[in-house]
Amino acid sequence: MRTSEIHRRWLDFFEKKQHEVVPSASLVSNDPSILFTIAGMVPFIPYIVGTEKAPYDRAVSVQKCIRTNDIENVGRTTRHGTFFQMAGNFSFGDYFKQGAIDFSWELLTSSQDDGGFGLDPARLWITLWEQDEESYQHLTEVIGLDPARIVQLPWEESCWDTGQPGPAGSTGEWHYDRGPEYGPDAMGGRQDEWPGSAEAEDRYIEIWNLVFDQFLRGEGKGKDYPLLGELEQKSIDTGMGVERLAYILQDKQNMYEIDQVFGVIEKAQELSGRVYGADGEDDVRLRIVGDHVRSALMLVADGVRPGNEGRGYVLRRLIRRAVRSMRLLGYAEPSMPALLPVSKEAMVESYPGLEADFTRISDIVYAEEEAFRRTLVTGTAIFDQVAGAVKQEGGRSVAGPDAFRLHDTYGFPIDLTLEMAQEVGLTVDEEGFRAAMSEQRERARADAASKKGGHTDTAVYNRLLGERGEAVPFVGYTESTLATTVE
Ligand code: ATP
Ligand code: MG
Ligand code: MG
Ligand code: MG
């Protein structure tokens, strides 16, 4: 089943169940506290927290999402994209747990001829809060789910909240068992280890997260807060990973092999002469290319332009990381003109607007690749000088101010400097780099203050540098992972 067909079936199914079909909001969230739309519920937050009255009781959407916090997972797990589509159904004071469970069960397990997804019911598992009697009973007595496939978790591992006093609820997460060839069996006493090891996560794929918004929570740290009673208006908020279901239904190993992504990987193979499946590290690079090219396409389509701050910086990193991955695959020519049109072709059925907008989108992406190529030429020469000098003096580390100069003058992202240093057996004084960065930030702040205004969104940089009091640990790179220090 094509990914666009999953998308369409989702909307059709819930529309028939009296849900208002709400088009995907932009990837550019209008919530100032987040850079991007990270979940299907984001556009509905006011209805869920109760600051606005919902204009409908039931809604359905397939929301475009970007999650930069998953960037380091891309190509390494089977199931994390930076761009993905989260299908959701929502109830604002209308149906609750039983209704949400019934809909999800019906859609997942009814046959494809009947408009469903036709999953084998015996492969479905669900996690629940251990005190959620209602869902447990409904699942075992009405749905007939084998209790051995219900995993009961403490509140901390099964709850949803916004991080502050307000609505909170327990969740139910549907998982699909891909079978023993993908990892150890969770039956027979392993339930208490759920979600368990990385291998278990590869076998039991989380596909659909149901949130039962039931309680009012009070003040507290982390997950340690009192539940103050039931909400007046209970809500249902769900999110199903379209790409995850796609790779299950398309019988693929991971989400990068689905119809909406794999074409780019095939083109990258053709350009580079590397063969997907022949080498683990190359495979990761190819998947990064497939993922990042698509994310760049969708971000530019939603109005983001490459830049040094905020959203623009995320986009810049995605494009540059894709270009750099192509170079690591041995292809040093411009690659976006070959790759981006393939991604557009794969996405246009679900997003027809891409066609008319493609000239604008591709101009932006190709220009960014060109800019990066120029940066690489100058920056690499400077880096080689610096690294050569360090080695000559018997040093092991690139000094912070040098890394900063590469960043500030030559546009070298710190992750690139880290990566190149690692390739020649050096480290980078990241602390010194951070110090130079914050000095510069201070200067910029003082400048901006004296000029009144000039506010820039430095959120990504702050996160890049591990601000908010704690430094992000540097966990070490291989050539193809860049992301451990970002978000
Ligand atoms: P995981 O534990 O696998 O990282 P999650 O619990 O962070 O997933 P949710 O926030 O519950 O994910 O999002 C709802 C659904 O969206 C998930 O059940 C999954 O199917 C899908 N999803 C989440 N993150 C991604 C991603 N980075 N790429 C593709 N699909 C995703
Ligand atoms: Mg996650
Ligand atoms: Mg999860
Ligand atoms: Mg989840």
Image (tube, rainbow, N blue to C red):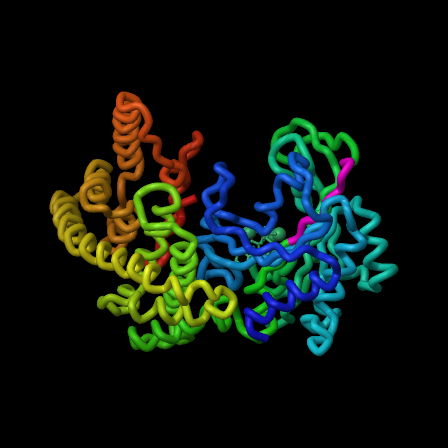
124 part of magenta stretch:
no
- The front one of 345 and 378 is 345
Secondary structure character of the magenta stretch overall: strand
Q: Position of residue 44 (x, y in %)?
A: 62, 45
Up-down relation of residue 434 to residue 249 (above or below): above
State left or right for residue 237 relative to residue 305: right
Q: Residue at x 52, y 64 (%)?
A: 78
- The front one of 244 and 383 is 244
| The furthest residue to the right | 141
Up-down relation of residue 165 to residue 105 (above or below): above
Residue 153 appears in the figure: no
Q: Which residue is drawn at 32% across and 58% down?
A: 479
- The quarter in which the N terminus is drawn is bottom right
Q: Which residue is drawn at 59% across and 51% down?
A: 40
Q: Which residue is drawn at 16% across and 44% down?
A: 390
Up-down relation of residue 433 to residue 122 (above or below): above
State left or right for residue 384 relative to residue 238: left
Rendered image quadrant of residue 54: top right
Number of numbered discs on residues: 0
- Which contiguous range is marked in magenta? 231-238
237 part of magenta stretch:
yes
Q: Position of residue 223 (x, y in %)?
A: 65, 35
- The quarter in which the C terminus is drawn is top left
State left or right for residue 180 relative to residue 354: right
Q: Position of residue 18 (x, y in %)?
A: 74, 58
* Ligand 1 located in image quadrant: bottom right
